[in-house]
Amino acid sequence: MQIVEASDSEDEKAPAKTSPAASPKDAEPFPEIKVEHSRQGVEKAKNEANALFSKGKVDEAVKWFSKGLWLVESQKVKDVPADLHSILHSNRAFAYIKLQKWPEAESDCSEALAVNSKNTKAKYRRAMARYELGKPEAALEDVEFVLKELPDPNSNKEAVELKQKITEQLKKKSPTAKAEPSQPAPGFKRMQIVEASDSEDEKAPSKASPAARPKDAEPFPEIKVEHSKQGVEKAKNEANSLFSKGKVDEAVKWFSKGLWLVESKKVKDVPADLHSILHSNRAFAYIKLQKWPEAESDCSEALAVNSKNTKAKYRRAMARYELGKPEAALEDVEFVLKELPDPNSNKEAVELNELGKPEAALEDVESVLKELPDPNSNKEA
């Protein structure tokens, strides 16, 4: 893709075209759920979702949260405040935690924080998801943020317990430890963090057995990298080189090593651009491997660090298309086309309509083309 980022390697190649992993859903999710296209309709969707969650109907709650998000992110409703938008993501993340869908929970929390960086519940829930995903260093960073925001012991009990679990895991550093799905631990009962507009009907997952052990704190110990900014650059460059040679799984390992150095704070002088690029490049590797939730999550992480990372927007559009989120994908790709009107720079963004999309998704992308005045600027869209 001819979108240039500072420090990004030109050795990076685009994945070969393949048939879509699965047909995306219809543009409007859950058409059986009828909600008024207004801010009040979005509030209704949130409140209904919270009520369903409190009754244990978690799958149904996800549908209502998703409907509310669709209204916002498809721009059917445009006057929704950032706080409410963020809460929809963080509450759906809580539902995903109940369902043990850890990548989806992490991604939703990152989305919530990209909209509102002060959403403390999203930080806490992302810490939970990252713990389960075997990312204790990143989980610790999130939970420490929560504890700084909520020093009152009456408000942070669950966060303190989670930090203890993460710290214990970091101390063990057992090379044989493996992340396995588990129910949230007893300490993950309802967290007493109040968000504006967040329903008090929201209930926490029920008590269950303690969580399984995540992976060793340092990923891929066989990969030796200097704990310095130069070491992070080396990890990125080695990963890009491996990717260009088709060794995508190995590339993921090197990107992950670089990210571990940054997010564990082993290296503290890494610029935001480089941190963001590590996430967006690993997302590209996940796209090649058709790991769509991981790709979407990495792109959201990249954008949370650097909102101007155009490649991350483009790659998230690709992942969201494959995940059956055409409206959100279209929003991302429209951003790319506005940022890169030059036809020599936006070729791949416009080529999204050549990926074998079903009719509904294809119409979405073609609607972008109708809004672009110069046919030469979008000939491949």
Image (tube, helix red, strand yellow):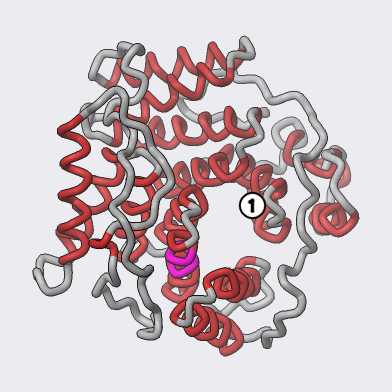
Q: Is 278 contained in the magenta span?
A: no
Kind of element beneath mark 1: helix
Image coords of residue 267 (percent x, y): 23, 27
**Residue at 26% over, 13% down:** 226
Image coords of residue 111 (percent x, y): 48, 57
27 horizontally vs 233: left or right:
right
Image coords of residue 274 (percent x, y): 40, 30
- The answer to whether residue 33 is seen in the rendering is yes
Q: Amino acid at mark 1?
A: Asp
Q: Is 94 contained in the magenta span?
A: yes
Tell me if residue 361 comes above or below residue 348 in the rendering.
below
Magenta-drawn segment? 91-95
**Residue at 65% over, 50% down:** 320
Q: Which residue is mark 1?
A: 332
Tell me if residue 284 comes above or below residue 251 in the rendering.
below
**Residue at 51% over, 35% down:** 280
Q: Quadrant of residue 158?
A: bottom left
Q: Quadrant of the N terminus?
A: top right
